[in-house]
Amino acid sequence: MAAPDPGRWGECGSRQPGRLGARSGQEPGTVLGAVGIMELVYVCEWENWAKNTYCPSLPLACAWSCRNLIAFTTDLRNDDQGSRLLSADADGHIKCWSMADHLANSWESSVGSQVEGDSIVALSWLHNGVKLALHVEKSGASSFGEKFSRVKFSPSLTLFGGKPMEGWIAVTVSGLVTVSLLKPSGQVLTSTESLCRLRGRVALADIAFTGGGNIVVAAADGSSASPVKFYKVCVSVVSEKCRIDTEILPSLFMRCTTDPNRKDRFPAITHLKFLARDMSEQVLLCASSQTSSLVECWSLRKEGLPVNNIFQQISPVVGDKQPMILKWRILSATNDLDRVSAVALPKLPISLTNTDLKVASETQFYPGLGLVLAFQDGSVQMVHRLSLQTMAAFYSSTPRSLDEPALKRPRTTGPAVHFKAMQLSWTSLALVGIDNHGKLSMLRISPSLGHPLEPKLALQHLLFLLEYCMVTGYDWWDILLHVQPGMVQSLVERLHEEYTRQKPALQQVLSTRILAMKASLCKLSPCTVARVCDYHTKLFLMAITSTLKSLLRPHFLNTPDKSPGDRLAEICAKITDVDIDKVMINLKTEEFVLDMNTLQALQQLLQWVGDFVLYLLVSLPNQGSPLRPGHSFLRDGTSLGTLRELMVVIRIWGLLKPSCLPVYTATSDTQDSMSLLFRLLTKLWICCRDEGPASEPDEGLVDECCLLPSQLLVPSLDWLPASDGLVSRLQPKQPLRLRFGRAPTLPSNTSTLQLDGLARAPGQPKIDHLRRLHLGAYPTEECKACTRCGCVTMLKSPNKATAVKQWEQRWIKNCLCGGLWRRVPLSCP
């Protein structure tokens, strides 16, 4: 599997037409039963499964993207065509799929290519040149730049200006290599060439990339008596046409074929994989018989070519002048194993201090160093990717000794349930497998791989991977599988500490991502679940502030460097007057003039600001309860200052268009509600605007806030679901059994429903969380929901105003928390 950018996969499909599915890592899935450090999380089965509807000999494929979306094929016979993702079939058709309307559960085929009548055996996206290495030995460093470094790596092909060109490469069963390039105009350039002059059958193939921008293809005809061949492929564009040049690289014979005791015992090569997509120097080979398998790991190295003494006397060879040769050397091999049915390789780019078998002791238990082997007896093993030593195991039935010879193990009367396709998550903390009954299983892999660790070090493991996801933008759902409720508080605090150590520019880039990460962590503990609402509200407040300030334009072109938004923040921070009109007169009101239609279109967002300020002030007398949503805002000087700035802007816009102002239901017709709220908000802001511990609000302010409910009607805020995801209901050693196409019926979290403001009565009107529009108790408009936070919004915009379009364009691809969208039925948005 290869993903040129988040959410993009490439994977070869099955040899026969089958059903292609796509699921989010945040939705139901499946598994068998576990011991040790590999545990079953959940199993997802088909509603009605009959033996006469599947093909047991059909090869399957699955892929796991860095956004925790899983695409897979099944061996169920079905005419449906399924699941930007690459798929290929036995007729040589390659299709490029993309999300329709950016919905994770809706896909459409946009472009493709074909090699007519030639089955595809390997398929991959071209490399985009992005490679980020993890330095595990520096996990305690303060700077993200020391922990994660950009590796110099050239794209497979670049456009003018050095931008990587998108496209894919495939290898066919007859020994052809085909490359398709996606031009910015949408045109597809396709070229097909033979891997070598003498074409032969290719039963197995894999694709890897070099740092110099070349492509390496490994190919085998399926017989262990034949060599495994390697080819260098160079792609270029000449005269608006795609050009492919190939070159033969050194080949190898498996060691088992040269061993007299094993020469004929493993006649077929069943698995051929490069150890990493960007590591063409290491390859994994598996040779099998009907009942057993053997795995070998090989490495390509440069070695000095010996020079005859005669030539040494004539012209001595010293230093760099010695001729070098590329040669494959075996690194390790296993003993006889049960027949291997599937292989999964890690994607975590751990940077090792050496490429030898001696790995630093502190990294021996890192799951990114292990690959997974599935066997036909239903067991699964994780082995070291270089030494092939067993690191973890999973059994579908009674565990057996790992040292017990495969030939002495009793055989079952029928084929056991076993994985036919597997993929590791991008942090190697979870494994998904598709078995021979079409079920999907999700396994949790311990970060320490069973090694005893102190709680502090175990926490450091998870923190390091969370930081990696925060820097790369990858989804972190698989990490949440390992977070226990007692770890949440420490993880959130440590994550915030590491974030504050970074440079201000990097903090600004990661500001929204860390809030989303904190929110998903806090869902896992009843002690922190109320903070989920606060983090989502901060994300919403940041988005509104950015959007509203972006609408402001300088009155004159030759203005100072500061924008109207910067001057607004500066003046509001300097002037601490509680009178909103006195603050307003210090601004150049001509810079805040907007079109009347624009102001009216923004009313719902301005209403939210006014309602939230009112809610916070009413909550002040109950500030001692951290279980009340909004609690963290009462001591957050930055957020209170932002709300104060927005109140001033809204006041100015209200002079231009009174109907755009927030609507309050007051007991007195003469009461200036905005002035009252601004005065109280300013007093609260003064208490905590400076760095350091916040001072307690005086009794007069608290008394005035106590009187607010008798002066203004306090609206009920529709908070986002605090804990509606599957991950918060997963319990260790208690796997869930789920079904495809059916929403899981999970017990409700009573601690969540008891929180103030989070319970929703049946039949209560629902709301568009991004547009702040009421949808009614039973919405009639198509909606989409975030797979991460549960945020709901309409699929199509009901407003054509430019300002509203600008707001909505922010959320076309992702939710405000960065999660993916999925279409939801009208009956349950």
Image (cartoon, grey):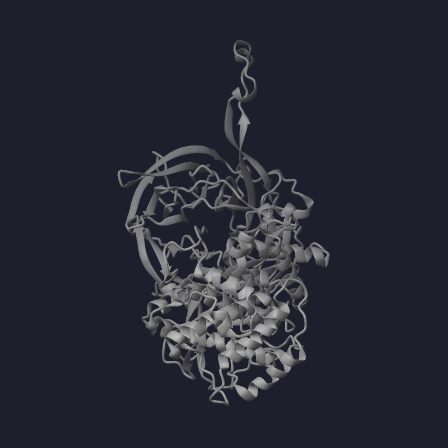
Q: Give the image location of residue 306, x and y in percent.
A: 55, 20
Q: Give the image location of residue 776, x and y in percent.
A: 41, 83
Toward the left, the furthest residue is 239
Q: Give the image location of residue 557, x and y in percent.
A: 36, 55
Task: Identify the image quadrant of residue 158.
Answer: top left
- In which quadrant is the C terminus drawn? bottom left
Give the camera-side residue of 319 and 264: 319
Q: Residue 49, can we see it?
A: no
Count the labels in the image: 0
Give the camera-side residue of 114 and 210: 210
Residue 243 appears left or right of 343 = left
Task: Identify the image quadrant of residue 416.
Answer: bottom right
Q: Residue 215, can we see it?
A: yes
Q: Residue at x 41, y 48 (%)?
A: 124
Q: Is residue 605 above or below residue 362?
A: below
Q: Residue at x 59, y 86 (%)?
A: 707
Give the camera-side residue of 812 and 177: 812
Toward the top, the furthest residue is 314
Q: Give the image location of residue 763, x and y in percent.
A: 46, 86
Q: Is residue 17 above or below residue 528?
A: above
Residue 753 appears left or right of 786 = right
